[in-house]
Amino acid sequence: MSLTDRTKPTDVSLNTDLYEITMAQGFWESGLVDYQATFNVFFRENPFDGGYAVACGMGQIPDLVENFVFEDEDIDYLASLDAPGGGPMFKRDFLEYLRGHHLDLTVHAVREGDIVFPREPMVRVQGPLIDCQLIETALLNLVNFQTLVATKTARVVKAAEGHPVSDFGLRRAQGPDGGLAVARASYIAGASSTSNVLAGKIYGIPVFGTHAHSWVMAFPTELEAFRAFAKSSPKNCVLLLDTYDVHQGIKNAIVVAKEMEQRGERLAAIRIDSGDLAKLTKETRKAFDDAGLPYVKISASNDLDEYTIQSLYAQGAPIDSFGVGTKLATCDPQPSLGGVYKLSATRKSADEPWRPTMKLSEMSYKRTIPGVQHVLRYYDANDCPVGDMIIVDDVAASTPGDVAYVEDILDAYTTYELKGTPRELLHCYVKDGVRNGEPDTIEQARERCHNAIMHLDPAITRFLNPQVYPVGLESGLVRLRHDLAAAERKQSSRGGDSE
């Protein structure tokens, strides 16, 4: 099911910041309707002080582009807006231009589940300047959050050491759409299931859930509650032990497990949601083993993240699965990826060559990379990535060698030697406003993520002080950036007058 199956096209086109539309009007009024642009989506720092990020949300870009259209009710709403200084905010002729307007964009992006790194383009958008501007906010909204969630989940899954992790975050997520995005992105990044039933319906993700503390509290005794649940859901029976006292809960669960055995059934697992999880799960495991119930699994929840899970296993906790909610859905402790959308090239029409542009900024880390960019990832003989090279369009047409020397994006004194086989990282999702084939399925994206992380150097995936993955600029791009910066500073010093 697509991005827009739950919304009308109007919900897509107006899901934007107001300044995107005011700028579009300005471009239209300035006679720049045929003006072409290239924008790139990238982030500046790896989230969670980690060594990588997991690209996600790109598979929904074709739906976004094809359904981004201003219908009559959208135009009526925009026409009703007044400017702060008085009078209508938008001109009638401009609104008629928008009415029924479709985006004529070509979009290249990293495939979902691939690993990405700071400052390299995750998405490249090309087409009419107005169209590129109109889609900015919706595109960033789509890619930023899902990439952040997928990265957080990949870290949690790594800490779980192959044991199932279920997304329990819906009730703490940022609204209904946020809950769906969490379920989708977390599954791509390796979560085994979700508690979100709607996400299961829309995306085909396995759903999981049994009962809460209220179930136990609704019965006169915990034992009666356990018996009633075992009778109601004998094929999906996981008992929550910590409503009152875990130690007594263990005894009651063992009684019910034995009764189920007599009926030819099996208690699947127990779950503990509070207390000293390492100590309590050890006690639980011993009690069930001593009772001849080694097949009963132990699940843990309660504000878990990658660090608590790692700590639990370091203490020898015999936990078979995890339910991770709040800290996954809210991406604690980092609520935003910080992905940006920056102009890198322009031209007056589609028949002209691109003119590279860059933002200098007073802050060096905000300076951008000019040109129509591509990313070449170099792989060694074991298909493991060793480094990425950012190149511009004219260089992309040449045949790259098996050895490349690149300059670090921020530090001109740091260079990297990349050896191996280069592959283009950006894939064409949309061509001239129409999807370029069907995106990968969620299962294909999930498999790609698993393989990508398995082939990544463990020094990069470790939680503490991860190694920096080499990403640099091709020598021609280094010169272009330097020359363009020098020219822009020279022009600025003359007050903007051109020679």
Image: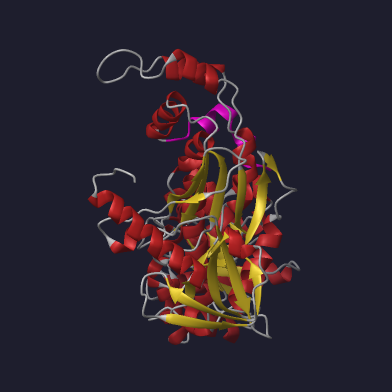
Where residue 310 sits: x, y (%)?
45, 79
The reply to whether residue 301 is visible in this rendering is no
Is 356 a magenta residue? no
Residue nearer the viewer, 57 or 276 = 57
Q: Is residue 219 above or below residue 305?
A: above
Q: Which residue is the extreme one toward the front?
A: 499
Where residue 403 sits: x, y (%)?
60, 82
Residue under the image location 53 percent in, 23 percent down: 98
Where residue 431 sits: x, y (%)?
68, 44
Q: Quadrant of residue 100?
A: top right
Residue under the image location 51 percent in, 39 percent down: 135
Residue nearer the viewer, 489 or 287 = 489
Q: Is residue 443 above or below residue 81?
A: below
State the count of labels: 0
Query: What segment carries the magenta color?
Result: 1-16
Residue under the image location 33 percent in, 53 percent down: 488
| Left or right of 120, for residue 69 | right
Residue under the image location 46 percent in, 59 percent down: 148
